[in-house]
Amino acid sequence: MGSDVPALGVLIDLPLGIVMWCAILRFLLSMVVKEDSKAGIMRLLNGLVTPPVRALQIITPRWVIDRTAPLYLAFLLFIIRFYAAPLAIGYDVNGFADLPLEHLILSVRSEIGL
């Protein structure tokens, strides 16, 4: 599967995947750490996730509260990565592990023997 994805697909999927996973991590960390915390990881996640969340406020439904907005962003990015990008660029995705970022992580994991 890794060689089947065109370079454009990888270039589009990697940033979207990184932002998706950062949004999920920010949502999970915000359950135990204050959102305006001075911790380095939380500041980094806020810096990566806050601009796309603010940009999506235009199309975000009213029932999505501010604390779950990163999770809504992650859901939309997953839908784009799983359905829209393969359809537009022209590669097949049969499962979650076939997405380019996750496939790359799993292949590195298997090469180092974890």
Image (cartoon, helix red, strand yellow):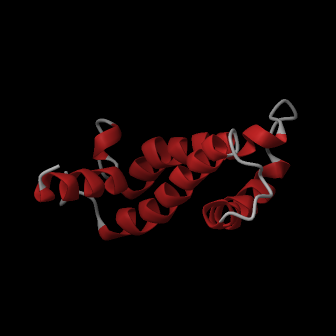
Residue 104 in picture, x, y percent from top left? 27, 58
Q: Residue at left 36%, top 56%?
A: 101
Q: Residue at left 34%, top 48%?
A: 99
Q: Is residue 62 left or right of residue 104?
A: right
Q: Residue at left 65%, top 43%?
A: 27
Residue that sits furthest to the top in the current view = 63
Residue 2 in picture, x, y percent from top left? 21, 57
Asked whether 8 or 99 is in front, the reply is 99
Residue 49 in picture, x, y percent from top left? 67, 59
Asked whether 40 or 78 is in front, the reply is 40
Asked whether 7 or 16 is in front, the reply is 16
Q: Is residue 79 left or right of residue 31?
A: left
Which quarter of the figure has residue 95?
top left
Residue 50 in picture, x, y percent from top left? 74, 60
Q: Residue at left 14%, top 59%?
A: 112
Asked whether 5 or 89 is in front, the reply is 5
Q: Is residue 78 left or right of residue 1?
A: right
Q: Let me know if residue 76 appears in the view.
A: no
Seen in the picture, residue 31 relative to 108 is either above or below; the reply is above
